[in-house]
């Protein structure tokens, strides 16, 4: 992992090692079997130290880290296409940015910024902002409103409930399949 692919043809085999949990587990077993490289190996000291820290983690944490790395491939694989990267950001951008503090232009009577300073007067006209309104820039966590209460909290709880329902349904269908009560065969 310390030696990323040097071209597009090397990229696919490199990333296929962690594309799903099974592949990540196979890679992890090979890493654990190899252990640390000898001091004279061509691996840099930083790569060796990073691997050493990784190998000291519990097995489940190691596996999850590899899976997480594979999950964000479109962002970190320099050979991903712009189309793949943009689609990934469109689908998962809100999840990745949630809680990250981002600069927001907010109304502030003490603020030094005026609508004329923004250079986006057409946008402000659509929002019907008074010319005398003052703004300032504040760091606000993404996914929260100005008052720090999460707008997505209800959506997340509904999403968790939906996932629990789907997981329970999948377990029940697996049970029916094993009992031969579904029209599928092993």
Image (tube, rainbow, N blue to C red):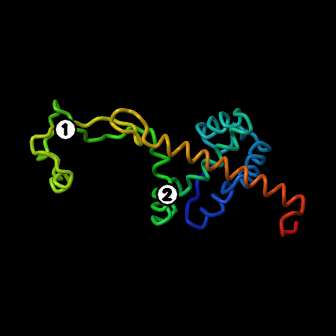
Q: Viewed as shown, does residue 144 lie left or right of 20? A: left
The residue nearer to you, when weighing 37 against 116, is 116
Tell me the residue that label 2 is attached to.
91
Measured in 3D between alpha carbons, the distance from the residue under mark 1 to the one under mark 2, in whole angstroms, is 31 Å
Q: Position of residue 19 (x, y in %)?
A: 66, 57
Quadrant showing the C terminus: bottom right
Q: Residue at x 60, y 45 (%)?
A: 160
What SS does tag 1 mark?
Answer: strand
Per the rendering, the mark at residue 135 is 1
In terms of sequence position, does the residue under pointer 1 or pointer 2 come before the other?
Answer: 2
Q: Position of residue 27 (x, y in %)?
A: 73, 51
Q: Is residue 74 above or below residue 69?
A: below
Q: Quadrant of residue 114?
A: top left
Seen in the image, is 103 located left or right of residue 17?
left
- For label 2, count other residues whose C-alpha is less than 10 Å away and answer few (under 14), some (14-19) or many (20+): few
- Residue 22, by quadrant, is bottom right
């Amino acid at each position: 992992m310390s030696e990323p692919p040097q071209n597009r043809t090397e990229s696919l085999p490199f990333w296929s090692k962690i594309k799903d949990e099974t592949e990540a587990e196979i890679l992890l077993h090979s890493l654990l079997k190899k252990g640390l490289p000898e001091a004279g190996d061509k691996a840099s000291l930083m790569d060796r130290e990073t691997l050493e820290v990784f190998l000291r983690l519990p097995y489940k944490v190691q596996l999850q880290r590899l899976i997480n790395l594979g999950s964000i491939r479109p962002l970190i694989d320099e050979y991903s296409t712009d189309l793949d990267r943009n689609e990934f950001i469109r689908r998962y951008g809100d999840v990745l940015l949630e809680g990250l503090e981002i600069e927001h232009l907010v109304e502030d009577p003490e603020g030094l910024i005026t609508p004329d300073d923004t250079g986006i007067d057409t946008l402000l006209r659509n929002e019907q902002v008074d010319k005398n309104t003052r703004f300032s820039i504040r760091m606000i966590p993404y996914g929260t409103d100005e008052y720090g209460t999460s707008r997505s909290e209800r959506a997340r709880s509904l999403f968790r409930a939906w996932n629990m329902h789907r997981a329970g349904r999948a377990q029940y269908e697996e049970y029916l399949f094993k009992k031969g009560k579904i029209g599928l065969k092993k």
